[in-house]
């Protein structure tokens, strides 16, 4: 499983995306939350094999509908997480 952490440019929520790549698709889920915690929701998504760009990046929809561009290189793989990545809980 690969993980991505980013901010949505539309709803300004913090977003966590978890994905698993299969030969014919990418399957995953998006979870978002606002800094004041009034928003906390998520949804599943799939990207068919043809949806991945030549560089390995792919789109994932935020719960608000904004398309998020995820790079080929995830923020973390499996249980490994970059020490510089931290979510600040206010």
Image (tube, helix red, strand yellow):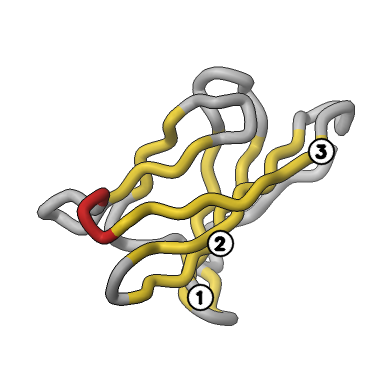
Q: Are marks 1 and 2 in contact (CB under 8 Å)?
A: yes
Residue pushed farthest bottom? 79
C-alpha distance separating marks 2 and 3: 16 Å
Write the residue at 56% across / 35% down.
62
User: For this view, does 2 lie left or right of residue 47?
Assistant: right
Residue drawn at (48%, 63%), measured in percent from left and top?
27
Q: Residues within 10 Å of mark 1 (few under 14, many from 20)?
A: few
On the image, the x and y values in percent for residue 8 come to 54, 29
Q: Is residue 88 left or right of residue 40?
A: left
Q: Residue at x 30, y 69 (%)?
A: 24
Q: What is the C-alpha distance between the residues marked 1 and 2?
A: 7 Å
Q: Position of residue 43 (x, y in %)?
A: 66, 46
* Residue that carries the numbered disc 3 in the rendered image: 40
Residue labelled with disc 1: 1
- Camera-side residue of 76 and 70: 70
Res 32 → quadrant: top right
Q: Is residue 62 above or below residue 46?
A: above
Q: Assess whether mark 3 and mark 2 are in contact (beta carbons under 8 angstroms).
A: no
Tell me the quarter of the image containing the C terminus: top right
Picture residue at 54% right of the left edge, 71% below the top: 81
Question: In terms of depth relative to the viewer, which is nearer, 87 or 30?
Answer: 30
Total numbered badges shown on the rendered structure: 3
Read off the residue under disc 2.
Answer: 18
**Of the image marks 1 and 2, the number of the one nearer the N terminus:** 1
Cα distance in 3D space between marks 1 and 3: 22 Å
Q: Secondary structure at mark 1?
A: loop
Mark 2: few, some, or many residues within 10 Å (few <14, many ≥20)?
A: some
Please name whichever residue, 7 or 49, is drawn nearer the observer in this view of the structure: 49
Position of 36 with respect to 33 (left or right) is right
């Amino acid at each position: 499983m690969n993980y991505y952490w980013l901010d949505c440019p539309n709803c300004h929520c913090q977003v966590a995306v978890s994905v698993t790549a299969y030969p014919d698709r990418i399957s995953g889920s998006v979870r978002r939350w606002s800094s004041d915690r009034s928003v906390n929701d998520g949804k599943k998504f799939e990207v068919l094999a043809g949806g991945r760009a030549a560089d390995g990046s792919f789109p994932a929809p935020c719960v608000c509908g904004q398309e998020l561009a995820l790079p080929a290189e995830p923020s973390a793989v499996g249980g490994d997480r970059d020490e510089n990545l931290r979510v600040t809980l206010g």
